[in-house]
Image (cartoon, grey):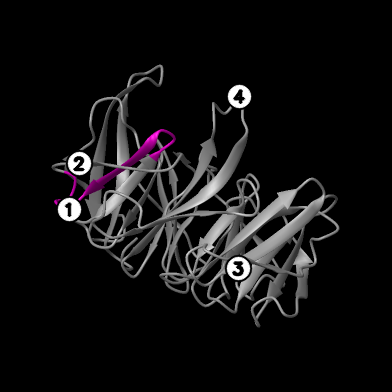
Amino acid sequence: MLTARVGVGVAPITTYSGRLIRGYLVRTNDAGASWRITGVFPNGIYPWTTAFISPEVGYVIDSTGALFTDDAGRTWSKVLTSGGPLSISVKGRVVWIPVEYCKHSAMQGPCSTHLDTYQVGALAPKSVASVPQEQPFFSQVGPVAGYAFGSGGISGKVYVTTNSGRTWRSMANPCESGQITGGSAVSLTRLFLYCGLGPTVLYSSSDGGATWQRRSESPGDGLGAAVGSSGEFLWQLNPGLWESGDGGRSWTPVSGVTYGPSGDIVTYGAHEAWHVVPGHGIYRTLNGTSWDLLK
C-alpha cells in the first residue's frame, strides 16, 4: 500500500486447473474495497510482489526477473538483475532487489546472494553487493540502510548495512545458538527477531541490536510475520491469524480469518493491514484489532 487508502497489486486470471492465462496490475483508492485494472503484464509473466512509489511508477518481480513501468502498467521495460530475484523493496527513490546468483545453475551451484540497488526509473543496478549469508530475510529501513536476517546451520546471524550492502556489520543477537525463523525492522533502531529450534521465541531491540528483550513465546514461527510502523501491532499466520497490540508481549487469535496460500500480510502505518486470499477476498483491518472481509 502506498497510503492507507491507495495501493497497487497483482491479479491473475487462471483456468480452473490453476494455469495462468494473464496477469493484471490493479489499483485501489478505497483501502482495498474495490479495484480496477490499470495494466496488463506480458504473456507468461505473473509477478508475485511489487515496489511502487506511486500508482503509476514501480517495479515488479517474479523468480525469473524484474519489470518496470512508469505508466501504471500500460507498458513494461525489462530490468537487468544479477540473478534470480528473491524479494523487492523501495525507500525514498532507492529500490533493493536481493537476488540469488548461481555460477552455473541452482542445482549445480555454487550460489550466493547479491543485493542489487537501483534509483527509481533505472533499468540496470547502480550497485551490486555481496551479502554475507545465503538467502536471508531482508528489511530495508531507508534508502541505503537495512538488515539481513539469516540462519546458517544452527547459528542465526543478523547483519546491518548503511551503504546499500557495500559493507555489512555482524550484530550479536539471541538467536546465535538457535535459528532465525523470521525477522523485521521498523527503523534502524527498532528490530524484531523470531528464534526457533524448539518453541519459537520473539525478541525485540529498541537500540539497533545493542540489547535485546525477550517478548513472548510466539504462536508461529515468524515466517511472513508483519509489524506496523510503530512496532506496537504485530500479526502472523499459523495457520489462523494471531495479533499483538503490545509489541509482541501477548498474542490473541483472530477468529474468522482464512489463511491464504502466500501467508503474506501487507501493512501501512501503525495499525492498518491486509491479507489476500485468492478466490475468497481480502481481509482488512484499519485499527489493528477488528478485521473485515472485502469480497
The residue at the point 45 percent across, 71 percent down is 287
Look at mark 2 in the image and give the residue it sits on.
Answer: 76
The residue at the point 60 percent across, 37 percent down is 111
Mark 1 neighbour class, 10 Å CA radius: few under 14, some 14 to 19, many 20 or more: some
Q: Quadrant of the N terminus?
A: bottom left
Of callouts 2 and 1, the N-terminal one = 1
**Residue 259 counted in the magenta span:** no
Look at label 3 and name its amino acid: Val
Look at label 2 and name its amino acid: Trp
Q: Secondary structure at mark 4?
A: loop
Q: Is residue 179 above or below residue 65?
A: below
Look at mark 4 in the image and give the residue it sits on.
Answer: 107
Q: Where's residue 65, x and y in %?
A: 37, 37
Mark 3 neighbour class, 10 Å CA radius: few under 14, some 14 to 19, many 20 or more: many
Look at label 4 and name its amino acid: Met
Where are the magenta residues, as a range?
62-73
The answer for how far apart the CA atoms under marks 4 and 2 are is 30 Å
Quadrant in the rendering for residue 120: bottom left
Q: Where's residue 280, x and y in %?
A: 41, 38
The answer for how far apart the CA atoms under marks 1 and 3 are is 31 Å
The residue at the point 17 percent across, 50 percent down is 72
Side of 289 where 18 appears, left or right: left
Look at mark 1 in the image and give the residue it sits on.
Answer: 70
Q: Is residue 168 above or below residue 236?
A: below
Look at mark 3 in the image and give the residue it sits on.
Answer: 160
Q: Are marks 2 and 1 in contact (CB under 8 Å)?
A: no
Q: Quadrant of the C terminus?
A: top left
